[in-house]
Image (cartoon, rainbow, N blue to C red):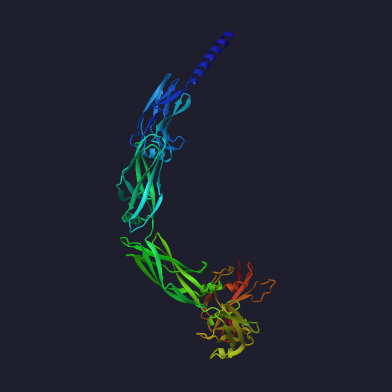
């Protein structure tokens, strides 16, 4: 038994030794010949031999090769598999011939690299192990090619001459040849424009060298670029230096043909307190012409103060095709009175009307000076007189003995005394010829340019029917008649009433600005009123009218005004209905109440 155990131990130790020997098999070395060689864009094929040492049976392979700069930037790959299987300790040769792409060489030179490393990683399978080795590919010693100026401007319609200096920086210290046979015009995206410059630039140098030329940019090539939608182009040269090609370019910004826009007249007069019309003739001038013409347009304009403060915008597009060296636009611009008012409020005696014109590339601003006539020492005028109820409505329905006033909103200019008379026509006359009686005289001094709001005296509401209120202007004289406004006073509702049938909105609608109130007409109605009351059981009372809106019988629908909304509290529920009122102020029909809520 002891002999058997001893024999088994010997066998196990032998097996363990064999495993240890097999596990030692691996890649032992990796090299490449030649380890370094010089390449150029015209001499870029290299034959290499990779030598990989292996200590035992294995499959050794490398699926790809990689071009990198010494700093590690990847320039490209070679997808060629190198692979073999060996059965004994040996050195495996892997021959490979590569042709380095010109794009890889150019990219390396552009990055400032003087060498390219071609790397391969070889992997063995017994056990798995890897070794990486690289071949050095030396480039010509060019550190940089620059151009001065780096950017220049060209104009369609004329030939532009530009002095150009190309600087080639060398670092190797050896004498090299520098040659560029032609230059070419391309778009910024690389599309050729069909024009080359057959001027050869050549020299030899050991360090840095400048090559100068006088570049003539033909008008035709600029027009070609424009027709392709380009606003920039490039002048490109390829330099052959010590067998390698290098590219550099000059950026050419295309300047538009539009050089200026004149206005006739250059000055005009606007009147304080009213809108003014100004007729202007704009003449756009171009530096030259191109085949097919060029479109000049203006999409916007602005009113500004002499100090540059915006006062308002000008709408309306101007656009014309210019065939020659000029194009004309005629337009009449309305200068709003509020624009003139804002200028005058800043203490200015004039303002500027400006327009921006463009030919698609260049932008030119033209202006007209507008002198303000009138002012505090000018003629006293009323530009607008509007009568409104306090809720902003033109019509109001009220109960008997309800307190009521109306508002006169007046815009004026100049200085003087306003003489006016609040007058009223009662129901006894408002059905036929209106007979007005005076309620209150108004005497008020006004100066400058502005707005004033006048309140009427308390208006009568004792009798039912229609009332007409007028503010009769005595001075200054007005070109139109005196403004009027109406209201209705209702009486007790008769016992028998018809029903107003509501079309919209539905029950429990959220009252927003877009909600439309519509109803079916009622025979004999002179006006309709939408009444809004608190919800039943609310603390504010059930019958109090919190908001209302009246419209004439010719109207079948309406929306609440902003002022009407202001009488309602947010987040509340209300009851509302529509009532029909006849000419004598009687409520002849009413709808059932519906509930509505505010947001």
- Compared with 99, 20 (above or below) is above
- Compared with 69, 214 (above or below) is below
* Quadrant assignment, res 47: top left
Residue at the outermost top position:
3
Quadrant of the image containing the N terminus: top right
* Left or right: where 260 falls relative to 182: right
Does the rendering let one see residue 350?
A: yes
The residue drawn where x is 37% and y is 65% is 285
- Compared with 115, 576 (above or below) is below
* Quadrant assignment, res 109: top left
Report the front residue among 303 and 22: 303
Report the front residue among 309 and 17: 309
**Exactly how many numbered labels are in the figure?**
0
* Left or right: where 138 falls relative to 197: right
Report the front residue among 541 and 106: 106
Residue 25: x and y, percent?
47, 21
Quadrant of the image containing the C terminus: bottom right
Residue 52: x and y, percent?
42, 24
Residue 585: x and y, percent?
59, 85
Report the front residue among 317 and 505: 317
Residue 307: x and y, percent?
52, 67
Residue at the outermost right position:
539
Residue at the outermost left position:
198
Does the rendering let one see residue 466?
A: no
- Compared with 73, 14 (above or below) is above
* Left or right: where 501 falls relative to 145: right
């Amino acid at each position: 038994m002891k002999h058997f155990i001893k024999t088994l131990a010997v066998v196990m130790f032998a097996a363990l030794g064999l495993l240890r020997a097999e596990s030692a098999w691996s890649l032992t070395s990796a090299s490449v010949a030649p380890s370094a060689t010089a390449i150029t864009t015209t001499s870029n094929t290299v034959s290499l031999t990779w030598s990989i040492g292996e200590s035992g049976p294995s499959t050794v392979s490398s699926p790809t090769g990689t071009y990198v700069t010494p700093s590690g930037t990847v320039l490209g790959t070679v997808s060629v598999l190198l692979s073999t299987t060996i059965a004994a300790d040996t050195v495996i040769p892997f021959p490979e011939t590569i042709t380095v792409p010109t794009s890889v060489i150019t990219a390396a030179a552009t990055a400032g690299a003087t060498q390219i490393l071609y790397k391969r990683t070889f992997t063995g399978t017994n056990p798995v192990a890897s070794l990486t080795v690289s071949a050095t590919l030396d480039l010509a010693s060019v550190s940089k090619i620059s151009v001065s100026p780096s950017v220049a401007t060209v104009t369609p319609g004329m030939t532009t001459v530009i002095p150009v200096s190309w600087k080639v920086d060398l670092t190797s210290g050896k004498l090299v040849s520098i040659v560029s046979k032609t230059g070419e015009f391309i778009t910024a995206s690389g599309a050729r424009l069909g024009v080359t410059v057959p001027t050869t630039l050549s020299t030899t140098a050991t360090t840095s060298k400048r090559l100068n030329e006088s570049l003539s940019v033909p008008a035709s090539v600029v027009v070609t670029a424009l027709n392709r939608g380009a606003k920039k182009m490039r002048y490109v040269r390829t330099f052959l230096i010590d067998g390698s090609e290098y590219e550099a370019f000059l950026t050419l910004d295309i300047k538009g043909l539009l050089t200026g826009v004149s206005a006739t007249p250059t000055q005009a007069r606007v009147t304080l307190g009213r809108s003014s019309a100004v007729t202007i003739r704009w003449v756009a001038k171009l530096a030259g012409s191109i085949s097919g013409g060029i479109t000049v347009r203006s999409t916007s304009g602005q009113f500004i103060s002499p100090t540059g403060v915006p006062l308002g915008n000008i709408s309306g597009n101007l656009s014309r095709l210019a065939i020659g060296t000029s194009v004309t636009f005629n337009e009449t611009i309305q200068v709003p009175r509020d624009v003139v008012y804002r200028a005058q409020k800043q203490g200015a005696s004039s303002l500027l009307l400006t327009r921006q014109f463009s030919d698609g590339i260049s932008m030119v601003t033209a202006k007209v000076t507008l002198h303000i006539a009138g002012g505090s020492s000018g003629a006293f005028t009323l530009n607008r007189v509007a009568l409104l109820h306090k809720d902003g409505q033109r019509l109001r329905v009220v109960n008997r003995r309800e307190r009521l006033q109306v508002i006169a909103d007046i815009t004026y200019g100049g200085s003087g005394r306003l003489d006016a008379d609040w007058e009223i026509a009662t129901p006894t006359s408002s059905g036929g010829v209106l007979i007005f009686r005076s309620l209150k005289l108004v005497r008020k001094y006004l100066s400058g340019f502005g707005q004033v709001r006048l309140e009427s005296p308390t208006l009568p509401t004792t009798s039912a029917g229609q009332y007409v209120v007028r503010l009769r202007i005595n001075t200054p004289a007005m070109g139109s008649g005196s403004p009027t406004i109406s209201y209705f006073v209702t009486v007790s509702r008769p016992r028998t009433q018809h029903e107003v049938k509501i079309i919209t909105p539905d029950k429990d609608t959220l009252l927003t600005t877009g909600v439309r109130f519509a109803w079916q007409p009622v025979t004999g109605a002179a006006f309709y009123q939408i009444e809004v009351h608190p919800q039943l059981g609310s603390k504010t009372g059930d019958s109090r009218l919190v908001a209302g809106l009246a419209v004439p019988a010719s109207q079948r629908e309406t929306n609440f005004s902003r002022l009407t909304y202001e009488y309602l509290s947010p987040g509340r529920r209300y009851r509302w209905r529509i009532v029909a009122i006849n000419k004598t102020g009687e409520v002849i029909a009413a709808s059932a109440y519906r509930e509505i809520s505010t947001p």
